[in-house]
Amino acid sequence: ARHVAAPAAHTQREMNQILSPKADIYLAFRLQLVTKLVVITLIYSSALPLCTLLTAAFMWLAMWVDRYNLLRRFAPPPRSPDFLISVVHCYIMPAAIAVHLGCTVLFFEQQRR
């Protein structure tokens, strides 16, 4: 529908508004994806150290994808809500670190037997 409506626009500004994708939930989606991957990596990194390298490779690739999308594709760039970042920082990451410590003790305890 965008490609049909855009050529009928009277000005370039109208055409840009029709063709540019909306970026309203992009940051929330990316934040949950990265948080989920970091939590899973923290849980299994003591048993599988390769998880850390795979997560680092994903983060490096995600940086370039996000840089392209946020700077070139989405108009206007989305604003990040402070509430989402504070929830991840204050609640999810401390819980993930506690689970990481518990799983590390569990994995090494099983290895010792």
Image (cartoon, grey):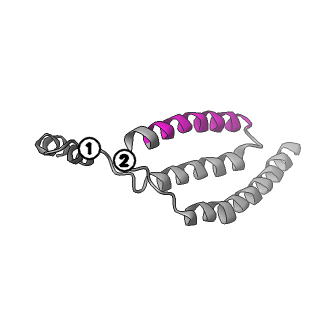
Most foreground residue, 41 or 34: 34
Query: Which residue is located at x 58 percent, y 36 percent?
Result: 58
Up-down relation of residue 27 to residue 62 (above or below) = below
Most foreground residue, 49 or 72: 72
- In the shown orientation, is residue 54 left or right of residue 104? left
Query: Which residue is located at x 17 percent, y 46 percent?
Result: 1
SS of the residue at dot 2? loop
Real-space CA distance between mark 1 and mark 2, rounded to the nearest whole angstrom: 9 Å
Sequence-first disc among 1 and 2: 1
Up-down relation of residue 101 to residue 58 (above or below) = below
Tags 1 and 2 touching, CB below 8 Å: yes
Q: Which amino acid, by three-letter code, is at mark 2?
A: Ala
Q: Give the x, y percent position of residue 72.
A: 41, 38
Query: Which residue is located at x 64 percent, y 38 percent?
Result: 55
Indicate the quadrant where residue 97 lies. Answer: bottom right
Residue 75's disc number: 2
Q: Give the x, y percent position of residue 96.
A: 70, 57
Residue 16's disc number: 1
- In the shown orientation, is residue 8 left or right of residue 86? left
Q: Please state the extent of the stretch shown in magenta in the rendering.
A: 49-69
Q: Does residue 11 belong to the magenta stretch? A: no
Question: In which quadrant of the rendered image does the C terminus lie?
Answer: top right
SS of the residue at dot 1? helix
Dot 1, crowdedness within 10 Å: few (<14), some or many (≥20)? few
Q: Which amino acid, by three-letter code, is at mark 1?
A: Asn
**Main SS of residues in magenta:** helix
Query: Which residue is located at x 72 percent, y 38 percent?
Result: 48
User: Which residue extends farthest right?
Assistant: 112
